[in-house]
Each structure stands twice: as C-alpha cells, then as structure tokens.
Amino acid sequence: MSGFLKFRLIIIVLSLLMLSMVPMMENNFYAPTTIKRWQQLDWNDFQGFVKPFSKWGAVISSNVYVEFDSTSQTFVAFAGQNNQRSWTKAHSTDSASSVYMLNHEQYHFNITEVHARMMNEYLLKNPDIPEGSRLSKLAEIRVELNKMQDAYDEESDHSLVKHRQRRWEYQIDSLLREYSDEPLKTTDYYSGATIFFPVQPSLLSKLRNGYGASRIYTLSNYDMILALESAQFSSISVPDLNKNIISSFEEDSLEILSFLTDTIQYTFDTEIITKDSTGEQIVHYRWVYHEDYLYRISAGFAFTENISGYEEIAKSFINSFEITDTDTHWRKYLTDSDASMIVNDIIKETTNDDKDIYQCATYGQEKSRGFFRAPFFTEEGEMILAYDIIAHEESVLYENAIIIDDEWYSYQPNSADQVFFVPAEKIPTKPFQMKFGYFLAEDTVKECLEYYYQSIMVYPPD
C-alpha cells in the first residue's frame, strides 16, 4: 500500500471516530450540571465525557464554593463536586479495583472538604470582611487546594502506589478531624490513655482471665490495625516487664527487629518492632507502665516490598500516645448529674406484718468484674471512683454500691458509666480496704440479695 493510501485510510478512520463521538459530546453538553455537596460518592456522580486517550480510569472535579446563608446571615464555604466535569471509563462498579478507584476519587473530594473547612474557619474569625478580601482568601484557598490535589496524585501515582495511597488517606482523615467539632484525640477517661485516631475507633471492654480487666480501642483501616489497650494492674514488677514481653514474643514465634527502652517520662516505656515467623506481618508495639495501668499501643500491617507509607502511619500513631489526668472530667460528670446519694447498712432486715417478708443482703464471690478509674479525692475530701462493669451474673442488676465499714453507698448518674461518690465524713482517716461492685436482683429461690465485688486498698490524703 502506498504512503498516500495509508494517509487517506488514517484520515477516514479518524473522521469516523470523531463522528461517533459527536452525539456523546452533544448529550454531555446538554446534560444538567449538578454540584454535589461533600458526602460519599458513587459512580453515578461521574457523568462527564471521558477525556480521549487518557490512561486514567476516572477523574473528579471538585472545588471550594462560598455562598450567603440567609438563615445565619453569614457567608459559608462548602466543598462541591461537578458531575459533568467528573468522568469514569466503563468498568464493573462492584469489582475490588473499582471500589479502590472510587476510594481514591473520594479522597480527592475529602481534600476539597478540608479546604472548605479552612475557609469556614477564616470566615468565622472574620465575619465582617469586605467582599474583595473574602474573594482573595477564596482564591488563596483554591491555590492551596490544587497544590495538595497534585501532590496526592503525584505521591500515590494516582493510587497505583498503594502504601503511599494509604498514607495519604491517613493524613487527609487526620486533617478532617482537625477541622471538625470532634476532640482531636481519643481519651479513655478510666485509664487516662490518650491517642490520635483519624476516625472513630471501636471500644471493647473485657476481663483478662482473672488478671483484671482491659479496655481496647481498635481501628481497622489503611490496610492496618491500630490499637490501644489499657490493662489494669494494681502491682507489677517493672524489672521483669522487658523479660516477660520478650518471652511472650518468643512463645508466639515473633522475630524482634527493634527494641528501644526509655524511662524518662513514664515508669516503663518500651518500643518494639516484630515480624511473624512467616515474614508476612509487621507490628510496631509500644508498652507503657504508669500508676497501676499497663498500656499496649500497636500498629500492624502486611509486609510487602514497599512499606514506607505504613511505617510512617505506625510511627505517627504510636508517638501520639500520652497519659492525661481525667479527674476534672469525672468531677464535672458528677456536677452535671442530678442523681442522689443512697446510704444503707449492708445487712438489712425489713418486716411487713401483713406479708411477713424477710429481706437481707449477703456477700457473694470476690473477683474482678470490671475496669475502674483508681479512687481520687476532691479538695473537700470526697472520694470518687469510676467503674465500668464488664460482666455480671445472669440475673438483672439491682444496685451498684461501694461498701465501707459495713455501709454501702450508691450513686448512679443517668448514664452508662457508674461513678461512685463517698462523702468526706464517711471516709476513714487511716488506710482501709474498700469493696465495690453490685447487687443482683432478688431471686425467688435465694432469701438474700448477693453482693458481687472486688476490693482495693485506699489511702486517704494526709
């Protein structure tokens, strides 16, 4: 075939291709444009015309907009996605690759939401700025937005580099939390443990085979498992901790890759990195012991050829841990409650002449059934102890109570948390053993209410 004929054939093919695209372009041109406010995306939000010869499977168009809210009489910013400038190639919308691709586009939209919140923060602080200043700030925010969008695509190679994609997701979620009304960190008000989770973790309270109780916060995200466990120990041998931890790793056939101990801030503080025997799982651990609580912070992920993104998440998560004083929280909790104090003798008899009913209360079995915030004293000498009941017998709870000198004290705020409160005049001046727990509902077979409890030594302030 001569060169001239080849050229003619190419022209004909391109012309046919362009003619076939005209109806599609017309449909797209006349289709209504929708600006979708920030929320979860689906593929129906991508109605735009596919960019010819693009190697990417999808593209999202989103920006920060400002409008006047007639209700609040203020200007507010919002993140919006343009459905006609967002497009996707034909693909199976329920495949794993499709879900992963949509997730990448969602985080582009999340970046836009971060910058909309930045703009709202500025508008809140400057409610009376002139229009020119407002538009100038919006232009500045949009420039920063585009830079971050480009960096996100460049570093993750449009999501193809998975560990960098996950690292960006962690960073973007962190920014969303920073520019929100939620507390920046998650705090366990029982143990005082505080740590940064980019999104809300789940909480599990459990008993530890007769060795006290644990409260565990867990987040499964970014192809990782991030966890914070607070375990209750009234006493522990600090010199033996390292030995016991290493021994437990050896029993589980874990290889220790790194071991670093620091005792400057806390009584015991050790960071350990392990790999399992198959070489498929890496876990970063941090163990901290401080004032009757042993904390275990962990970040685990699968070992692959490139893991730097996961390593950065693990270090950021573990280093965000700290122990805070939660006394103020519980004081406010009691102040805000309208519950009343109940004081009774532990052994009680009541006689009804008509029905001749005899009631009493007796001690049941002593063992750990919950997690507690160690007792502390107010400036007025009152004692407070917060108690998270994890497990109790099959019967329905009747009453929670502290017992001191054969008197029981019940103080039940209107909440899931049980907070015990003992007035100053009822507290012995010398160290004493205190029991706390609960009574079960009356059983038709048993004559007495049974008191299930655990006990601790309390040392009143001088």
Image (tube, rainbow, N blue to C red):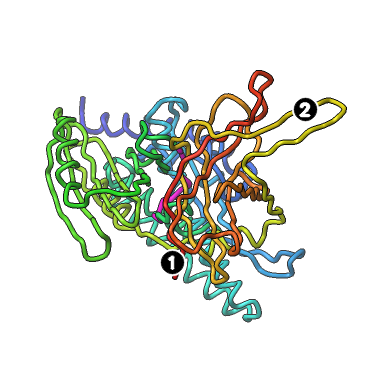
Amino acid at pointer 1: Val
Query: Of all residues shown, which one is farthest toward the top?
Result: 445
Residue at the spot 40% in from the left edge and 43% down from the top edge = 104
Comparing 423 with 270, the one in front is: 423
Would you name the residue on which mark 1 appears?
A: 143
Amino acid at pointer 2: Ile
Comparing 302 with 402, the one in front is: 402
Q: Quadrant of the C terminus?
A: bottom left
Residue at the spot 27% in from the left edge and 43% down from the top edge = 163
Would you name the residue on which mark 2 appears?
A: 357
Q: Where is residue 226 shown, x and y percent of the image? A: 35, 43
Q: Is residue 176 magenta?
A: no
Left or right, 123 with reference to 53: right
Q: Secondary structure at mark 2?
A: loop
For marks 2 and 1, give the one nearer the viewer.
2
Q: Quadrant of the N terminus?
A: top left
